[in-house]
Image: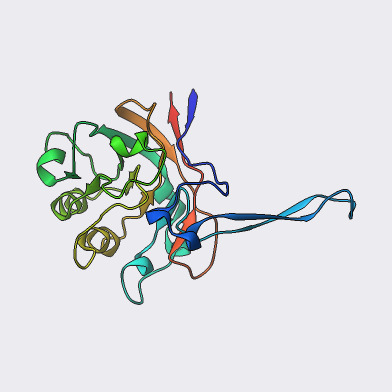
Amino acid sequence: MKLHDISMEVSEDVQVYKNKEEKKAKLVQQYDFNNSSVYETQLTMNLHTGTHIDAPLHAIENGETTETYSLDHFFGSCLVLDFMAVDEKITAKDLEEYTIKEDTFIVLKTKNSLDEAFNYEFIYLEESGAKYLAEAKIKGVGIDGLGIERNQSGHPTHKILLKNKIPILEGLRLKDIKEGYYEIAAFPIKIKDVEASPVRAVLIER
């Protein structure tokens, strides 16, 4: 068995969406051995910073929150699809090239994994692709961008997936991951009444 960590490392220099200052992580040392018998650090960051899941409330008014998902959404069979050749967006036509089984977690590998800084032209999942995956009744979907869509009025990709209770896993690091089947473990932190949560995402190769 081999474990592949596909999470972003959280630091004050972590890549954030559109380079927004308010999304950057802040690490503040509160206690050290000069003034205390223990060492403690405080972390402050947006819940969409680094590798994280989106729940329905993120895009749907009065939508459900992260803790309403059962844990089995974040563990089980996973299919990584290699779309490194795609230049702008992933559509239903692109996805039709694959056999996508019901109740599988789909991970989309793109050129985003090569970006060390935020790329405003990141590859995204287009509306037709979201519809295709929702109709396939997948368990969840992940992508190596800090957003799963861009420049789509009304955020249809988010809404289609989240209305179908399909969690969205964003901010993956897939540069060294090969296409194929794995098991995924990507459990969100248990935070009450929020629209997103940080995740430590791992692919398991047996």
| Residue 98, picture quadrant | top left
For image coordinates 90% across by 51% down, the residue present is 37
User: Does residue 109 show up?
Assistant: no
* Quadrant occupied by the C terminus: top left
For image coordinates 47% across by 40% down, the residue present is 7
Q: Is residue 58 left or right of residue 24?
A: left
For image coordinates 18% across by 51% down, the residue present is 126
Q: Is residue 48 above or below residue 144?
A: below
Judging from the image, the colouring scheme is: rainbow
Q: Is residue 188 above or below residue 143?
A: below
Residue 33 image point, x, y percent: 87, 48
Q: Is residue 89 above or below residue 127?
A: above
Residue 192 image point, x, y percent: 53, 68
Q: Is residue 91 above or below residue 111?
A: below
Question: What is the tally of numbered marks visible in this picture?
Answer: 0
User: Does residue 131 show up?
Assistant: yes
Most extreme residue toward the bottom, as rendered? 62
Q: Nearer the viewer, residue 16 or 59?
A: 16
For image coordinates 18% across by 43% down, the residue present is 88
Q: Is residue 35 left or right of residue 204?
A: right
Most extreme residue toward the left, as rendered? 93
Q: Is residue 117 left or right of residue 79?
A: right
Residue 171 image point, x, y percent: 40, 46
Residue 26 image point, x, y percent: 60, 56
